[in-house]
Amino acid sequence: MHILRHLSKIEKIVHRTIAQFPAEARSFLSNMARPTVYVTRDIGPEATDLLKNHCDVTIWAHSEPVSRADLISNVQGKDALFCLLTEKIDKEVLNRAGSQLKVVATMSVGFDHLDLNELKARNVRIGYTPDVLTPATAELTIALLLATSRRLLEASEEARTGGWKAWSPFWLCGPSLNGATVGVVGFGRIGQEVAKRLNGFGIQKLLYTNQSGKDNILGGHRVPLDELLSASDFVISTCALTPETKEMFNDETFKKMKSNAVFINTSRGGVVDQDALIRALKNGTIWGAGLDVTTPEPLPLDSELFKLKNCVVLPHIGSASIETRNAMAVLTARNIVSALKGETMPSELLI
């Protein structure tokens, strides 16, 4: 107790002494030990305030992605980097950041934009945001499936431009989920949440592929990919982008699908050979496609995909609910703060 009283007195003396310093000096001393963070986009007030409570924060506060030059310039000397899918974090960026960089946290569940080998070699910790966006992405997957199969965008355009003349028996008809066989490629968190939401639509059979080898998850049947493709009325891609899945949906894949099949992709654009998809849609190899992800992003306005009535293209809005995006930003900020303190991160990618 005697020692504690002395320490308390010393602390009070230090604070009184600092209080007498000029404002510039007080600011320097208060910030001297604070870690620095570079944030590559406006992330909302809650996540920003969380970071500012613990760090000195520099933000690229624009709606468009940070340019490569600005990223490389602003990351120099920072202890942490808060990034998005739009930024490629590679050797060049990490070299410029410097050896003091402790953590890179991405506001995404995907991490194919990060050079994992370089980060591991430098002992830089990695944060990401799985689980948080799962329900929102599953909701959007179902919405995109229905918009594609029931031709909602096409119907809305007809109604707005005078194409709607009268009720007609087979005008703007599309395939129904009721009684259908649905195949989900990649049956992880998002794939399983999609399956749960399909239950209310009266589907006849659920097929899936996954890495766990488990059958009868959520009442579905695990089958080889070729069997899934040939048997499914709807094929939904929710798999991760890896070297094994890159452009796995190609000419041969689409030829194995039913001619009345609907293809939905809410995973990554890179799992699809887009030229092959365009050929499949034009030639009637498959009935239609709904895409929330493309290569590149944004998709050029002159892309053939935009010219096809049997293709619905969305601008990567799978997780775009207000609550989800805020939760993703806050989780990313918490990952950074925890890593800088040397604590367990709420969601660390271990490689």
Image (tube, rainbow, N blue to C red):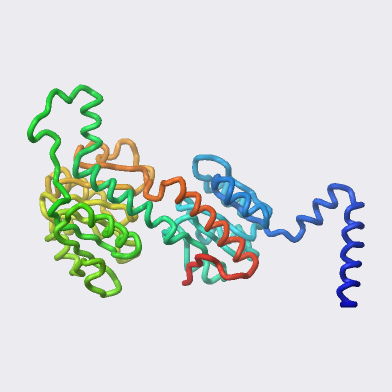
Q: Residue at x 38, y 57 (%)?
A: 134
Question: What is the number of callouts on the image?
Answer: 0
x and y, in percent, of residue 315 in the image? 36, 43
x and y, in percent, of residue 44 in the image? 55, 45
Query: Going by the image, does 100 lie left or right of 296?
Result: right
Query: Going by the image, does 276 lie left or right of 67?
Result: left
The image quadrant where one finds the N terminus is bottom right
Query: Going by the image, does 243 lie left or right of 101?
Result: left
The furthest residue to the left: 169
x and y, in percent, of residue 210 in the image? 27, 68
x and y, in percent, of residue 268 in the image? 34, 55
Query: Going by the image, does 146 lie left or right of 240?
Result: left
Query: Residue 188 occupies which quadrant of the picture?
Result: bottom left
Q: Residue at x 30, y 51 (%)?
A: 141
Q: Is residue 29 visible?
A: yes
Query: Residue 112 occupies which quadrant of the picture?
Result: bottom left
In front of the other: 63 or 67: 63
Q: Is residue 294 visible?
A: no
In front of the other: 309 or 155: 155
Q: Is residue 72 above or below residue 206?
A: above
Q: Residue at x 64, y 57 (%)?
A: 78
Q: Is residue 126 above or below residue 212?
A: above
